[in-house]
């Protein structure tokens, strides 16, 4: 099936309240433009340099989402245009985003990345760490970031009951954090293999790549 067919199929299955982020990492601009011409306007990249290059070549009505792990020294390259940063896992990173956003007189939307997986390789903060951040004096002084939700990545496993438990943990975390920070509205969880389960568990934003663009080529 074509990229347009894949997008149409996924969109036909999505409830109205769920946002689709097309994960376009490693894919050429021609593929992204095929998705764009099919109506897709939200793209997710996991490397800032690649996202900047695509931003410069593509239409300016696209919402660019940074979905990968963010190094603080790279924030400045995307601060002018990034719409949503999914992977905020520390106050230090949030302060850097705030500092760089201020240079462009922007408020950048951010999601707190919560560690829900058992794997050590997954980034993210604990619920207690996230609460501490939101209640901190330092956070209250940041004027150029908006915490608009949470993001989590489930364990890479075929055990659906484990994935479901982890997704439900993120939903519970979301509920607790929303009582502290009322701007929190997004739950970003679910990818190509598990987005239906994620939606059942409360996801409002899914990150789908291979089901739209086909498998990735990492040799480039």
Image (cartoon, helix red, strand yellow):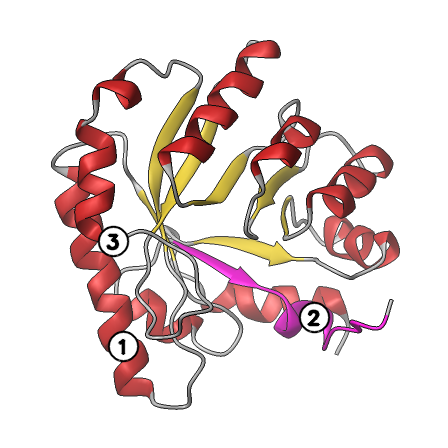
- Of the numbered discs 2 and 1, the one sitting upstream in the chain is 2
Q: Quadrant of residue 140?
A: top left
Name the residue tied to disc 1. Answer: 164
CA–CA distance between discs 2 and 3? 39 Å
Of badges 3 and 1, nearer the viewer stands 3
Rendering coords of residue 107 (x, y %): 48, 19
Name the residue tied to disc 3. Answer: 126
Residue 109 vs 212, above or below: the answer is above
Rendering coords of residue 213 (x, y %): 72, 69
Name the residue tied to disc 2. Answer: 5
Highlighted range, magenta: 205-219
Q: What crowding class fits label 1: few (fewer than 14 Cα within 10 Å), some (14-19), or many (20 or more)?
A: some
Circle 2 SS class: helix
CA–CA distance between discs 2 and 1? 28 Å
Q: In which quarter of the image is residue 78?
A: top right
Rendering coords of residue 201 (x, y %): 26, 67
């Amino acid at each position: 099936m074509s990229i347009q067919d894949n997008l149409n199929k996924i969109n036909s299955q999505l409830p109205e309240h769920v946002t689709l982020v097309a994960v376009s990492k490693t894919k050429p601009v021609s593929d992204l433009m095929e998705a764009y011409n099919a109506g897709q306007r939200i793209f997710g990249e996991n490397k800032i340099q690649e996202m900047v290059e695509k931003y410069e070549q593509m239409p300016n009505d696209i919402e660019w989402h940074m979905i990968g792990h963010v190094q603080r020294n790279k924030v400045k390259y995307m601060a002018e245009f990034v719409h949503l940063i999914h992977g905020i896992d520390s106050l230090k990173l949030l302060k850097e985003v705030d500092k760089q956003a201020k240079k462009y007189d922007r408020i950048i939307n951010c999601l707190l990345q919560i560690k829900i997986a058992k794997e050590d390789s997954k980034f993210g903060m604990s619920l207690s760490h996230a609460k501490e951040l939101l209640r901190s004096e330092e956070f209250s002084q940041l004027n150029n970031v908006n915490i608009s939700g949470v993001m989590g990545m489930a364990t890479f496993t075929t055990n659906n009951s484990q994935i479901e438990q982890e997704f439900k943990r993120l939903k519970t975390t979301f509920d607790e954090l929303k009582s502290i920070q009322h701007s929190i509205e997004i739950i970003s969880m679910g990818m190509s293999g598990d987005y239906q389960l994620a939606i059942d568990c409360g996801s409002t934003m899914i990150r789908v790549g291979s089901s739209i663009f086909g498998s990735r080529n990492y040799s480039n």
